[in-house]
Image (cartoon, helix red, strand yellow):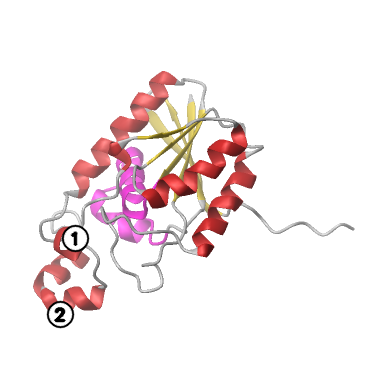
Amino acid sequence: MTDFVLVRHGETVWHAENRYAGRTDVPLTDHGREQAAALATWAATAGLTAVHSSPLSRARLTAAPAAAACGLAAHTDERLYELDFGQGEGLTRDEMRGRFPERLAAFLADPVENHLPDGEHPRRAAERAADCLADLAREQPDGRILVVAHSTLVRVLLCHLLGIPLADYRRVFPVLHNGALTEIRIENGRTALLSFNSPALNRVPSHH
């Protein structure tokens, strides 16, 4: 069996405005870099055997400190890219409502069959990410692998692997926090969800 720890990259400069960041290479904020440092502190004692990330800088720069803390190389895989949001790229939901209100309403009703105009089909994205994890599981059948990727990609991937209808990804997994840990186990091609959206570092316990 192979365990995967799936992590959304640290906070970016578009986070405060809640802009859709797909393939655009948006930089981390100072807080995002702090989240990467917290992930590295967790990773140092997590027993990881490999670190992989999306090639986008917000994912690479979140993964790099964790890889260094473990003495591991950080690898990238294009199959871990965020979805391309097409005409929604870089926009807030209010801006989309002004530009293509009918398409936005359809997207909110079914974000898979009515994905954003000119954007990537979520099913294709889920399949490419699942192919990546299947390859890693074959390479490390007893591994514990950190994968740093993106919010929508991780949520559609979880639905795909767990047999949840893809169109429900925003309802079943409404929020994926930056830098939080989601752990899954893949064994004989079947996936179990071990934890979801856990903080990388809990508060320091009081000493009584």
Please report the residue visible at 38 percent of the width from the left and 49 percent of the height from the top: 57
Q: CA distance from mark 1 to mark 2?
A: 19 Å
Disc 1 residue type (three-letter): Asp
Secondary structure at badge 1 equals loop
Please report the residue visible at 38 percent of the width from the left and 29 percent of the height from the top: 190
Asked whether residue 196 is in view, the answer is: no
| 75 lies left or right of 164 | right
- Observer-nearest of 32 and 176: 32
Quadrant of the image containing the C terminus = bottom right
- Observer-nearest of 26 and 38: 26
Please report the residue visible at 36 percent of the width from the left and 31 percent of the height from the top: 133
Highlighted magenta segment, given as a residue range: 149-175
In the rendered image, the vertical position of residue 167 relative to residue 29, given as above or below: above
Asked if residue 166 lies in the magenta stretch, the reply is: yes
Disc 2 residue type (three-letter): Gly
Query: Residue tagged by mark 2?
Result: 98
Asked if residue 174 lies in the magenta stretch, the reply is: yes
Indicate the position of residue 34 as horizontal and vertical percent values: 57, 58
- Nearer to us of marks 1 and 2 is 2
Q: Closer to the N terminus: mark 1 or mark 2?
A: 2
Indicate the position of residue 152 as horizontal and vertical percent values: 32, 54
Total marks in image: 2
Indicate the position of residue 117 as horizontal and vertical percent values: 11, 61
The image quarter containing residue 151 is bottom left
Q: What is the chief secondary structure element of the magenta stretch? A: helix
Q: Which mark is residue 110?
A: 1
